[in-house]
Image (spheres, rainbow, N blue to C red):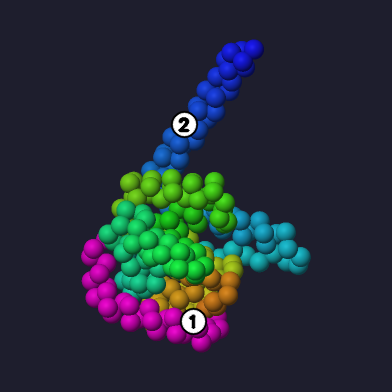
Amino acid sequence: MAARKKRSRKPLLRRIALVLAGMMVLSVVLVMILRWVDPPTSAFMVQRWIAAHSEPGEPPYVYQEWVDWDAIPGAVKLAVIAAEDQRFPGHRGFDTIEIERAWQRYRAGERLRGASTISQQTAKNLFLWSGRDPIRKGLEVWFTVLIELLWPKERILEVYLNIAQLSPNTFGVGAASWRYFERPVMALSTSDAALIAAVLPNPNIYRLETPSATVQRRASWIRRQMAQLGGVSYLNKL
């Protein structure tokens, strides 16, 4: 009896293995294509659009405008690195130093804080859903490994700058520059770039249209970090 049950499970396990293998191959192909093809949207943008249409009243637009790498000022690129992931040029998707620090703070009694890199945030925003469940975290690791293997650092940062959420309905520096600074991203100043980077931790609370004292202080800190990194020449490490 036990032997028959074991044999009956084999076809099911084989089918599950084939499905998983197929999904892995498709994910590799998708990531490879997106190395050269600009993604028309992201998982987070789709989720926001769906959520907006389930809310009462007229659903708001989701604002996003793609801007190519060469049209994004170095100050904007550097500000985001200074704010979010200063070891971005050197790591391979995961900042082990920040992970260790977060773990030590947790063991000391502090709340466990994330240590997500720009690569991890790009993988999450582009392909996945919000949340902290183990399945999502596992997929985040998988897609982070893929984009680090298949994309150059410039492409990872380019995609991140175009899909990062910068207000409840605004994604990417292109749309944010028009909505909140009334000019194209290529015309943004260093101060503007620091303000954009300052809202990234939580754009639902930190707002570009009415920067709070907290956002202003964070923007000042980001400008100091940009200088300490050596200015836009730091981008030569990518």
| Residue 142 shows in the view | yes
Q: Which amino acid does label 1 sit on?
A: Val
Q: Does residue 138 sit above or below 231 in this rendering? A: above
Q: Is residue 160 above or below residue 183?
A: above
Secondary structure beneath dot 1 equals helix
Q: Give the range drawn in magenta.
A: 209-238
Which of the 4 quarters of the picture holds residue 87? bottom left
The residue closer to the viewer here, 45 or 72, is 45
Image height of 115 relative to 182, above or below: above
Question: Which residue is farthest bottom?
Answer: 213
Q: How many marks?
A: 2
Q: Nearer the viewer, residue 141 or 6?
A: 6
Quarter where residue 237 is shown: bottom left
> Callout 2: few (<14), some (14-19), or many (20+) C-alpha neighbours within 10 Å?
few
Residue denoted by label 2: 21
Cβ atoms at labels 2 and 1 below 8 Å apart? no
